[in-house]
Image (tube, grey):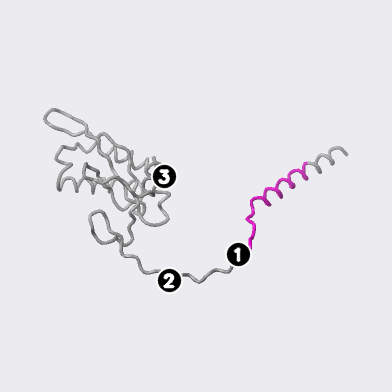
Amino acid sequence: MHKVARLALAACLIFGHAATAAEHAAPKAEKKAPAKAPEKKKAAPPAQSAAGAEGKVGYSDTQIQLGGMMAPTLGRDGATYQVVTLRLQLAVGENERAACWMAPIVAEKLLMYLHSAKLEAADFQGQRRELLVKNLFDVAVKATDRGYYTGVVLLDETTPPLTDPRSMTLSSQCK
């Protein structure tokens, strides 16, 4: 008799808590006021980039700025180290969260590339700089997928700081 009573009590407690939890987790339906007709807005002009070019279709202005990395550069005096700061340009779409999660892994892969590339001081200027940026983007794509990032920016003293609040938030969170 005691066993049956204990089983009944246990069942009441389990099913009672489950019903209460389901009751609290379920969204409550509320009556909404009738929706107003959407106002027609004028088409916004295409966004201007920092260089003044036309807005990019299918590209985002959101970027993740990675922390500074020490890249060895070879010279006459042996190896010296140069601080390299990179920004990952995010693709538009649903992959923004995944790109944020992958940013630390991509940063590690980029650092490994910089240490194995045997760079020289001339690699950070002119056409060799563009080739370095292309190679860094290839490393980012190999570490993730082409759908996460649209480019890599190698910062220098003339690069403006991040002003986009979304980019600043992602740069602080995606480390």
**Residue 160 against residue 28 in the figure, above or below:** above
| Tag 3: amino acid | Trp
Give the quarter of the image for residue 55.
bottom left
The residues bearing labels 2 and 3 have C-alpha atoms spaced at a distance of: 38 Å
Query: Which secondary structure dominates the residues rendered in magenta?
Result: helix
What type is the residue that disc 2 sits on?
Answer: Lys
Name the spot of residue 154 as percent of width and height, x first.
24, 44
Residue 117 locus on image (x, y percent):
22, 38
Q: Position of residue 104 (x, y in %)?
A: 37, 40
Q: Which residue is mark 1?
A: 32
Is residue 29 highlighted in magenta?
yes
Pointer 3 local density, CA inside 10 Å: few below 14, some 14–19, many at least 20 = some
Q: Which residue is mark 3?
A: 101
Q: Earlier in the sequence, mark 1 or mark 2?
A: 1
- Tell me the magenta residue range: 10-31
Tally of marks: 3
Real-space Cα separation, disc 1 to disc 3, in angstroms: 37 Å
Asked whether, in this view, residue 86 is left or right of residue 168, the answer is left
Instruction: Name the residue type under label 1.
Output: Lys
In this view, the mark in front (2 or 3):
2
Q: Which quarter of the image is occupied by the C terminus?
A: top left
Q: Residue 152 magenta-drawn?
A: no
Q: Read off the residue under disc 2.
A: 40
Q: Residues within 10 Å of mark 1 (few under 14, many from 20)?
A: few
Quarter-wise, where is residue 101 in the image?
top left
| Local SS, label 2 | loop
Residue 71: x and y in percent read 24, 35
